[in-house]
Amino acid sequence: MLTLFERNDAEIKRRSTQTQEAVLNVLIQSKKAMSHEAIGKKIDVDIDRATIYRILNRFCEDGVLHKIVAEDGKQYFAVCIKCEDKERAAHHFHFRCTKCQTIECLPVPVHFSLGVGYNVESVNCVLTGTCKECS
């Protein structure tokens, strides 16, 4: 099990708690993005919904997790193990499978172009379809 302290991220200076470790370990073990509700069902410590939200948002602020907002507005959270580059972790696309309902970080960049004068600061995009396992 990977703990918050083993991530070796210089930016993380907060004290680690049992509940933080439990939330992080659920996400690491799942190897996919999970909703707040799914995390709450899998967690093995007594924790209320508001605390889970605070932990998830704090992890997003610290760069431990990233938030994915699907087309239905539902939020998912992921530890982007494939994204070792912090800049890429904040600026990449995701894929949601309509059959198995999983959301994953796309392993390759998706290219797009905008007209002159546009400056992209962040990307929040979920492509929807059938994943390679369900095809």
Image: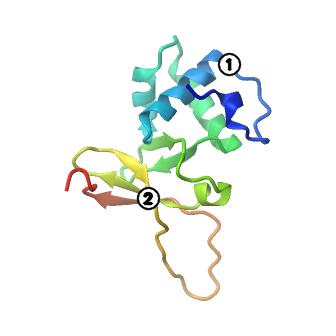
Residue at the spot x=73%, y=38% of the render? 8
Relative placement, left or right, of 118 versus 111 is: right
Disc 1/disc 2 C-alpha distance (Å)? 31 Å
Tell me: residue 75, above or below residue 20: below
Which of the marked residues, 1 or 2, is nearer the chain's N terminus? Answer: 1
35 or 85: nearer the eye?
85
Quadrant of res 14: top right
Quadrant of res 17: top right
Q: The disc labelled 1 sits on which kind of residue? A: Thr
Relative placement, left or right, of 29 versus 81 is: left
Q: Position of residue 77 (x, y in %)?
A: 50, 41
Residue at the spot x=39%, y=29% of the render? 38
Q: The disc labelled 2 sits on which kind of residue? A: Leu
Quadrant where the N terminus sits is top right
Residue at the spot x=44%, y=58% of the render? 106
Judging by the rendered image, the residue that carries numbered circle 2 is 106
Relative placement, left or right, of 13 versus 6 is: right
- Badge 2 crowding class, 10 Å Cα cut-off, few under 14, some 14 to 19, many 20 or more, is some
Q: Where is residue 116 in the image (x, y as percent from the top left)?
A: 61, 88
Tell me: residue 110, above or below residue 95: below
Tell me: residue 44, above or below residue 39: above
In the rendered structure, find residue 46 and report the number of the disc placed on it: none
Relative placement, left or right, of 100 versus 22 is: left
Tell me: residue 128, above or below residue 8: below
In the rendered structure, find residue 17 and report the number of the disc placed on it: 1
Q: Are marks 1 and 2 in contact (CB under 8 Å)?
A: no
Q: Where is residue 113 in the image (x, y as percent from the top left)?
A: 51, 81
